[in-house]
Image: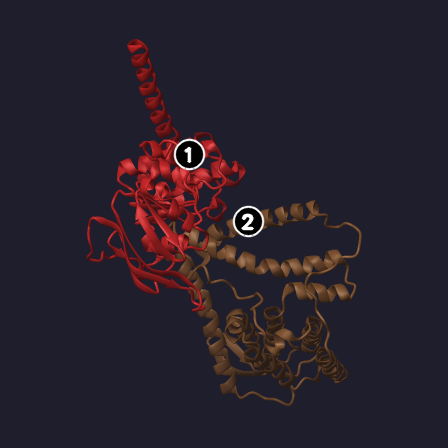
Amino acid sequence: MVESTPTNPTLAIDVRGARYVYPTGNVVALGGVDLQVAHGEIIGIIGQNGSGKTTLTKLFNGLLKPTAGTVIVNGVDTAKHSVQQMAAHVGYVFQNPNHQLFARTVRMELEFGPRNIGVPEDEITERVDEVVEFFGLQEFIEEHPYRVSFPVRKLVGIASIVAMRPPIIIFDEPSTGQDHNTTHIINGLMRRLRERGTTVVCVSHDMPLLADVVERVIVMKSTEVIADASPREVFADQALMARTNLQAPQVTQIALQTVVPLGGPVALTPAELAADIAQRRGKSARRGRTSSVAG
Amino acid sequence: MSMQAAMPIAMIPGNSIIHRINPLAKLVWVVGYVILAFSTQNIVILYSMALFALLLAPIAGVTKPLLKGALILVPVGSSLLALQIIAPAVERPWTAVDQIGPLVLYGDGVYYGFVLLGRIVASLLMALIMVMTTHPSDLFTSFAKLKVPYTLNFMLAMTLQLIPVFQREVGIIMSAQKSRGMKGTGFSAVLPSFVPVFVGAIERVQQLSISLESRGFGSDGIKTSYRQVRGRASDWVVGIVGAVVLITLSVVAITKGTWSLANEITFSPLFVLITFLIAATLFAGVILAAIAFSFKK
């Protein structure tokens, strides 16, 4: 039984002064991070390789225990509970699906997690059916997970975590190496999880995905959080982007060089930029008609 | 610390005197150790060899990982001793010294149990010290100097280099399965962890072979190595001393008919009983712990 720790009930993740030093004692992987994430929030964590993103997220489900500070997730102190106990609270989608798939069929793979956390059999069937439908896995359900293509395998890996219905889900590089269709499904999944009130943490280098989906971006550099703001604010901050060697989505970079100096918005998606351009062309056309009528 | 909790059978970087010895000189010692260990039944020699190997560990700075790697000896050694005491691997008649219920304990088996254990301990410790203090590429370069066929040499070096890679992979896979609520230890963890490790290993090796072939592996011509290993005078001394001592002892052991001290050493019934109880308890403990983990949800 996992005991709850008294904490702010509105917070899904409450990290206070968390540090992580590798057991060898000479590598600081995380240096004093404070982070509060409310229930139902969808956040992205960005930063260069080695900045501490994955270490931070591994503290969330107890894969790593903080060497200093506290990490309270869904009211549970991760330092006092095993990863298995935390599994009911936090789902962790690993970057490489091959690291988790082992069962004889996709169905058995999807049943594995819910069964481990004690979900009743009839509910397991219901959950599996739901994720199969959402991810479009009907035709693969009796296939061996290693006989399906890599993008489908990736979806099976994600679906196996979603079927556990944890209140918090962490995605580690969900779109790396994926085709457009899979990325589109992952994008839709994140929106659906948000509608359900699931807290989503997404570690990614895929800026367009984050710009499109997340509400808040955490920027990490050299094992510390150096910025925490909306994607619009973060991606518009060119000094921050240069400092962290990150690049805003291309559409945002175009907007910053074209429409923003004219008073336009910091576009995060092609649709936003297109809408602004269309609006300007409309205004320009109306002005042209007005001047020709006046002439 | 699942990510770091891997079996410590890989090179531990360092600059100790043992690290600096030429790989071939170290190999002479390992091969000599194995030959001598299996040439003799003299427990004084066998455990002196094990003690000598153990003394090298602090000099090389690998004591902790060495002891961790040697943990495998607990189930192996305890089962060996317990079985030898109740069913000695020597010709009858056996001398019964005690009885526990239906189990008759024989004094003859204790000596041979310790001989078998001593062979494994001595050989394993020396081999582990070599692996932990030698860069696989240095071994590769040294073998190349000995004109070992390139492909065979490459396979040996690559196998050693892949060990830490697979250890890391096992850590990640265990983390992934534990994140789905699986117990991270015991038999129940074997299948969910073994399949991804096995599949990953095959995929990795396949990719590696494609990558090697695409870069001209197997083509003719002289192969060179980025790392250079030089044999200093001290390396020659270490190698020659090792070869002379170990070969001499092996020859003496063989000429003396394994140089066994079985007839000179007698074990008291109490010693046999205590040895059996300790060995059987350790072995049963390992088995019970494994069964308990497999049923623990």
Q: Amino acid at mark 2?
A: Gly
The answer as to whether the residues below labels 2 and 1 share one chain is no
Neighbor class of circle 2 (other Cα within 10 Å; few <14, some 14-19, many 20+) is: some
Q: Secondary structure at mark 1?
A: helix
Residue A19 image position (x, y, % from top left): 35, 62
Residue B98 image position (x, y, % from top left): 51, 82
In the image, residue A25 above or below residue A293: below
Residue A164 image position (x, y, % from top left): 34, 44
The residue at 39%/30% (across/down) is A270
Q: Which residue is mark 2?
A: B200
Neighbor class of circle 1 (other Cα within 10 Å; few <14, some 14-19, many 20+) is: some
The residue at the far bottom in this view is B264
Q: Colour of chain A?
A: red
The residue at 31%/14% (across/down) is A291
Q: Which residue is mark 1?
A: A254
Q: Quadrant of residue B26?
A: bottom right
Quadrant showing the N terminus of chain A: bottom left
Q: Is residue A37 visible?
A: yes
The residue at 49%/82% (across/down) is B273
Quadrant showing the C terminus of chain A: top left
Q: Is residue A61 visible?
A: no
